[in-house]
Amino acid sequence: MITYHEQERIFKLDTPNTSYLIGIVDEENFIGHIYYGKRLKDADVSYLMRTEEAPFVPGRNNRERCAFYDCFPFEYPAGGTGDCRESCLSVRSAGGHAGAMLSYVSYEILEGKPELAGLPATFGTAGECITLKLLCEDRHVGMQVELLYTVFQDVDVVTRSVKITNTGKEHFYLTKVCSACLDMDNRDYDMISLHGSWGRERHIQRKTLGYGIQNVSSLRGESSHQDHPFLALVEKSATQENGEVYAMNFVYSGNFRAQAEVTQFDYVRMSMGIHPENFCWKLEAGESFQAPEVVMLYTDKGLDAMTNAFHKLYRKHLIRGEYRNKKRPILINNWEATYFAFDTEKLLSIAKEASGLGIEMLVMDDGWFGKRNTDECALGDWQVNEEKLKGGLKYLVDEVNKLGLKFGIWFEPEMVSPDSDLYRAHPDWALAIPGRPAAQARQQYVLDLSRKEVADYIYEMVASVLRSANIEYVKWDMNRPLTDIGSYGLPADRQGEICHRFMLAVYEMQNRLIKEFPYLLLENCSSGGARFDPGMLYYSPQIWCSDDTDAIERLEIQEGTAMLYPLSTMGAHVSDCPNHAIGRVTPFETRGLVALAGTFGYELDVTRIPEEDRKMIPEQVALYHQYNDLIREGDYYRIASYSQNHKFDCWQVVDEDKKESLVTFVQVMCRANFKSRRILLKGLSEETRYEVCFVNETKIQPKVYSGDTLMKAGLLIPEQQGDFRARLIHLTAK
C-alpha cells in the first residue's frame, strides 16, 4: 500500500483504486507532488513535476530560483521565500522575519495509524491501514515538520496531517498552518461547496472554478451554518454516476479555510486548514504543534462514489462508542412541545403517551436548571430547578424509566449568561477584550475554555448532574459564535491561540464525558447544524442536522449533509405543524418518511396532536425498526434532487449484499394533467430479480423485475394528488 522507490526517490501510496505519488528532487531535497488519481502500475512518473523544463531546479539554474519556487508542485508549500501562490505554512521568527522552505530528511512507514494528540481523527489498526511519515526541516528557522499520510485497505481515501516542532533555541510564531495541499493541473474544474444559514444548512453549490483564489471559510469559532469544511473539484461533465472528483473534508470543528487557487500557469492549488485570521501560535524551543486532519479523496466514478467512500470511512474509522454500529433509541424531545413552560407533571404526561406509542426515550431540553424560564439567564448554573422538577431530577428519571423509556437531557456547557450566578462570581471567565464591551448573542457570552480551570469547573458541573440519575443521552448545544476573542488567562503574545485552544478544550471535555459515561449517547448541536462536521462525529455518533424540521426544507439540508455523512449521523425528527420555523403544513406521513432517512425521533407534544397523526406513530415506529439497519449501514445513492428540479426528490439505500433496497420518493409539487414519473434505480445487482413493494399502499401490487431493468429502464412512480406527498418503496431479492 505504501512503497519507497529509492533510486527514483519516489513514494507511492496505493488505495484499492487510486495512487498518490510524492517525489524528492534536486540536491536541496524539495518535496514535490507528482500524481493523485486512478491507480498506476508505474511509480516513475516524476516527469509530471516538469523539472526538466525551464526554469529548472535551483541545482541547475540558481539564478531563477524564485521562478522555480513559483511553479513547482510543492507537496507542502511554505511562504515568504519565493512561491507567491497561497502557502500552507507561515512562520515568523522572534526577530519578526517571515519565511520558510522545507527540505526532505527521512521517512518512516508505520503499520496502522497513530493518534493525533488532543484532536479527533480517523483510526485504524495494522492490517486496516498503513501510514507514511515524511520528516522535513528548515534549518534556518530551526523547525522540523512531519507530514503524515494514511491509506486504508478498504476505502479510497488518503488522510493527511502535519506536526511542527521547534528544534531551535529561540521561540517562533506559526501564523498559518494548513493540514493538506494538492498541486495539480487545471482541467476546467467546477467547484462544489456547501453553504447556508441558520435553518438552511449545507445546501449544495456548484460553480465554475476561475483564475485566482476561491474559498469557503468560517471565522465564527465553529464550522458554521454559513460554510462547511468541505471542498470538491470536479470535471465539468461529472455527474452522480460518472466523472473525476477531488475532495477534501476537514476533521475539525472550529475556524477553517478551504480554497482552490488557479494560477498563471493553469495549475490548481487546493488546500485546507485552520483559518489564519486571528491565528498565531507561539512555539517555544522543544514544543510541537499538531494540526488537525484532512480526509482527501479521488474517484473517477462521480459523486455517488465520493459519497459512499466518505460514508464508509466515517462509519468504520471515525465514529466510536457503543452506538457506532447500533440502532439509536427513538426519542421525543420536549423543546417544540413546551419550550420553557414545563414541569415534572407535564413531562411525565408526554412520557406516558409516548411510551404507549413505541417511543423509547424522553429528552428534557432547555429550561430545567437554575432560574431558566427564558433564554435570558442562568446559563452556567447547572443545578436542577426543583421548583419545576418537583421531587428532583432523579425522581423524574426514575418515573420515566418505570414507563419503559430512557431519559436524556440538554446542556449548553460552553456558554454563560450575564444574568447568572456563575458570571457574577467569575466575570473574567467569559471571552472579552479588556476595555471593550463584549457583544451578546442570544443574550449570552462564551466561556473562556482556553483556561483549564474554567473547562474543569464546567465539566464537573455537567458530570455531577449525569452521576445523579440514570441519564443515557446528552444533547450538547452551542447557540452563538465566538466573538470578542480575548482571554484573561493568556499573555499578550498568545492571544492568537484562543480559538484553537477553545476547540481543543471542547474536544477534551467531550472525550472525558464519553470515557466516564461510556454508555452515553452524545448528540452534538449548535443552533441546529452549525457544528455538523467530522470532528464532532469522533465524539458523538449523531449530530442535530438543523433547527428547521420542516420536511420540505429538510430535503435540501439532508441532501447536502448526506453527500458527505452517513444517514445514521443525521439528527432528524418528526415535528408539529404548522412548522415552528417556517409555518408550512405537510402531511404527517411525509414528515415521518423524511425523518426516517436519519436518526428518527419526534419534536412535538404527543398529548396534543390530532388523533389521526397520533395513530400513525406506531406505524412510523415499526418502519424505523424494520428498515433502520438498512438505512444506517447501506450504500446511499442520490436518484433525483429537488434542489435542482424544484419538483420532486428521491434517494435510495442498498445493502452491501445487494439483496435489499429502500427508495424514498417525495413529490413536492403536484401537476395538473400529470403522468407517472420514471426513476432509474442504482446500486442493484443486474442479474438479481427484485420484488418491488410500495410500502403501506395496498392498491399497488408488488411486482418482480430484474436489477438490470430497474437500473436501465427504470421504475414508474404514480403521481398523487396534493403537494408534499411521499412514498416508500422496498425491494427484496427473490
Image: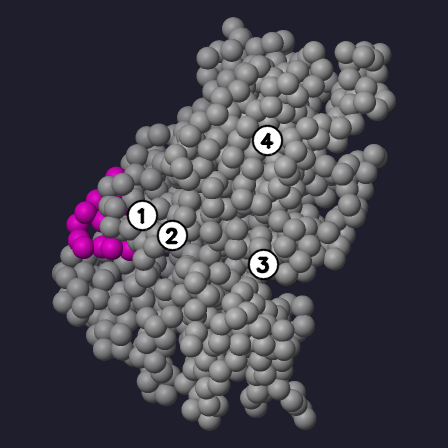
The kind of residue tagged 4 is Lys
Q: CA distance from mark 2 to mark 1?
A: 8 Å
- Pick the quarter of the image with the C terminus: bottom left
Q: Position of residue 270 (x, y in %)?
A: 67, 38
Q: Nearer the viewer, residue 408 or 434?
A: 408
Q: CA distance from mark 3 to mark 2?
A: 22 Å
Read off the magenta span.
459-476
For marks 1 and 3, the one nearer the N-term is 3
- Residue 313 vertical placement versus 660 (above, below): above
SS for tag 2?
loop
Q: Residue at image x 24%, y 50%?
A: 519
Foreground tag (3 vs 2): 3
Q: Is residue 249 found inside the magenta-colored segment of the image?
A: no
The kind of residue tagged 1 is Gly
Q: CA distance from mark 2 to mark 4?
A: 33 Å
Which disc is residue 321 wearing? 1
Q: CA distance from mark 1 to mark 3?
A: 27 Å
Foreground tag (1 vs 3): 3
Q: Nearer the viewer, residue 279 or 71?
A: 71
Q: Residue at image x 83%, y 35%?
A: 264
For marks 3 and 2, the one nearer the N-term is 3
SS for tag 1?
loop
Label 2: how many Cα within 10 Å (few below 14, some 14–19, many 20+): many
The kind of residue tagged 3 is Asp
Q: Nearer the viewer, residue 441 or 234?
A: 234
According to the picture, the residue beneath numbered tag 2 turns out to be 541
Q: CA distance from mark 1 to mark 4?
A: 34 Å
Which disc is residue 12 wearing? 4
